[in-house]
């Protein structure tokens, strides 16, 4: 018998084991300087699981900037900028639900 995916796993989107550099910034009403770096563990169209330097409690809003492996027109580096909220934190890893995202061009590396 094949188990029902909805019973064994609550995820609605497939996760992909993408490991990329990530920079994050905590968003709040005060001017927060809480920023850090990490690495993605896996990603889907609805969320990102990543390593973190800080304890990020569920409910915190974040902006993530992820270096993207593809380039625009095969020459311009891209980054994925996503905003959302933390839904889980465990021992240096956090899961963020993506609520909005956009691709931006990254500064080109100096030759």
Image (spheres, rainbow, N blue to C red):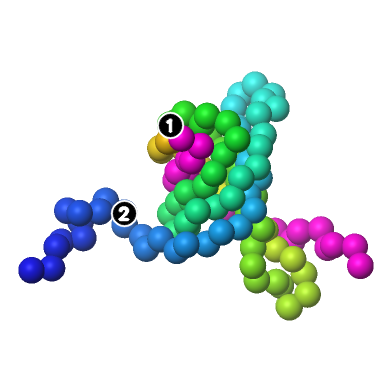
Please state, as top left, top right, bottom left or bottom right, where the N terminus lies in the image: bottom left
Report x, y in % for residue 13. Answer: 36, 60
> In the rendered image, is residue 98 in sight?
no
Residue 98 magenta: yes
In the image, residue 92 above or below residue 39: above
Point out the stretch of residues depicted in magenta.
91-111
Report x, y in % for residue 107. Answer: 81, 58
Residue hosting label 2: 11
Magenta region, main secondary structure: strand
- Residue at the extreme bottom: 74
Q: Residue at x 71, y 72 (%)?
A: 72
Along the horizontal axis of the image, is 75 left or right of 68? right
Residue hosting label 1: 58
Q: Residue at x 47, y 49 (%)?
A: 49
Residue 48 magenta: no
Q: Quadrant of residue 24?
A: top right
Is disc 2 surrounded by few (<14), some (14 to 19) or many (20+) residues within 10 Å?
Answer: few
> In the rendered image, is residue 47 in sight?
yes
Q: Residue at x 37, y 63 (%)?
A: 14
In the image, residue 111 above or below residue 80: below
Q: Secondary structure at mark 2?
A: loop
- Residue at the extreme right: 111
Report x, y in % for residue 15. Answer: 40, 60
Q: Report the front residue among 52 and 67.
A: 52
Q: Residue at x 51, y 37 (%)?
A: 92
Report x, y in % for residue 43. Answer: 47, 57
Q: Secondary structure at mark 1?
A: loop
Along the horizontal axis of the image, is 20 left or right of 99? right
Is disc 1 surrounded by few (<14), some (14 to 19) or many (20+) residues within 10 Å?
Answer: some
């Amino acid at each position: 018998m094949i188990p029902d995916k909805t019973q064994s796993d609550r995820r609605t989107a497939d996760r992909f084991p993408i490991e990329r550099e990530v920079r994050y910034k905590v968003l709040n009403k005060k001017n927060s300087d809480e920023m850090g770096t990490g690495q993605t563990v896996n990603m889907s169209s609805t969320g990102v699981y990543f390593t973190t330097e800080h304890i990020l409690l569920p409910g915190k809003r974040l902006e993530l900037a992820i270096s993207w492996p593809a380039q625009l027109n095969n020459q311009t580096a891209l980054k994925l900028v996503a905003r959302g909220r933390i839904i889980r934190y465990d021992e240096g890893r956090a899961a963020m639900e993506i609520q909005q995202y956009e691709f931006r061009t990254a500064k080109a590396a100096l030759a």
